[in-house]
Each structure stands twice: as structure tokens, then as C-alpha cells.
Amino acid sequence: MTRVEFVEKTKHYHGNVGGWNIVLDNYSTADFDLGCYYDKETRMWKVFENEERGMRGIRLETPSEEKALDKLYSMIEFANEDYLYYKEWEAKKKKQE
């Protein structure tokens, strides 16, 4: 997807989805960040995920910005589904108490 399409599809998250921050165009070392950036040294787009306690990983390296944004979008959608499932579970648990 193009950058314009990505921004349009993700604008309702306001840069945050289920506790994850969405970072574009910069590499971040902060916990709970999902993002992508262009690495000038390797001339590749890199999609990353930073979990808690320093667990960091590059999930995709590609010369295509569109592929990088597609991957990042799929990671955001997965994080959102996981967050919504947790919120439903939490609400059911409270009702049972």
C-alpha cells in the first residue's frame, strides 16, 4: 500500500494501538513500538517490533516502501485484534465476579 493509503487506514489509531506506539520514518528503541523506516546504509525499508525489556526485532527488510507498509499494517491489525480480544475477556471476567 502507498503511504497515503497507510495513513488513511491507520489514522483512527492516533499513533497508538493496544498499548503499542506506531512509529514511521524513524528507528526507535523504546518498548512497545511498531514501525518502519528507511535505512540509508543498506538502502532497505525495515519493519521493526520492540517488545518489553529490550526485546527488539526487525520483522522485514525490503527495498519496497509499499511492502514495508503492508507488513506494518498487518502487524498493527494483529495487535489491535489481540487488544480487542483481551478487552472482551477482561469484561467477561468482571461480569463473573
Image (cartoon, rainbow, N blue to C red):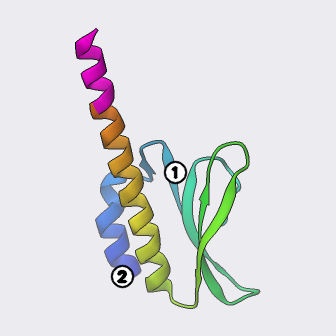
Residue 63 is situated, as x and y percent measured from the top left of the image, at 57, 91
Residue 59 is situated, as x and y percent measured from the top left of the image, at 58, 70
Instruction: Tell me which label, 2 or 1, sits earlier in the chain.
Output: 2
**Is residue 94 found inside the magenta-colored segment of the image?**
yes
Q: Can the viewer see residue 39 in this picture? A: yes
**Is residue 28 found inside the magenta-colored segment of the image?**
no
Residue 51 is situated, as x and y percent measured from the top left of the image, at 62, 49
Q: How many marks are shown on the rendered structure?
A: 2
Q: Specify the amino acid type for callout 2.
A: Met
Residue at (31% x, 42% y) in the render: 84
Residue at mark 2 = 1
Local SS, label 2:
loop
Residue at mark 1 = 21
In the displayed structure, 94 sits above or below 71; it is above
- In the image, 70 versus 93, the foreground residue is 93
Number of other residues with Cα within 10 Å of mark 1, as a class: few under 14, some 14 to 19, many 20 or more: many
| Left or right for 49, reference 30 | left
Q: Can the viewer see residue 14 in this picture? A: no
Residue at (39% x, 67% y) in the render: 74
Local SS, label 1:
strand
In which quarter of the view is residue 46 placed? bottom right
Residue 58 is situated, as x and y percent measured from the top left of the image, at 64, 69
- In the image, 11 versus 53, the foreground residue is 53
Number of other residues with Cα within 10 Å of mark 2, as a class: few under 14, some 14 to 19, many 20 or more: some
- In the image, 44 versus 74, the foreground residue is 74
In the displayed structure, 45 sits above or below 74; it is below
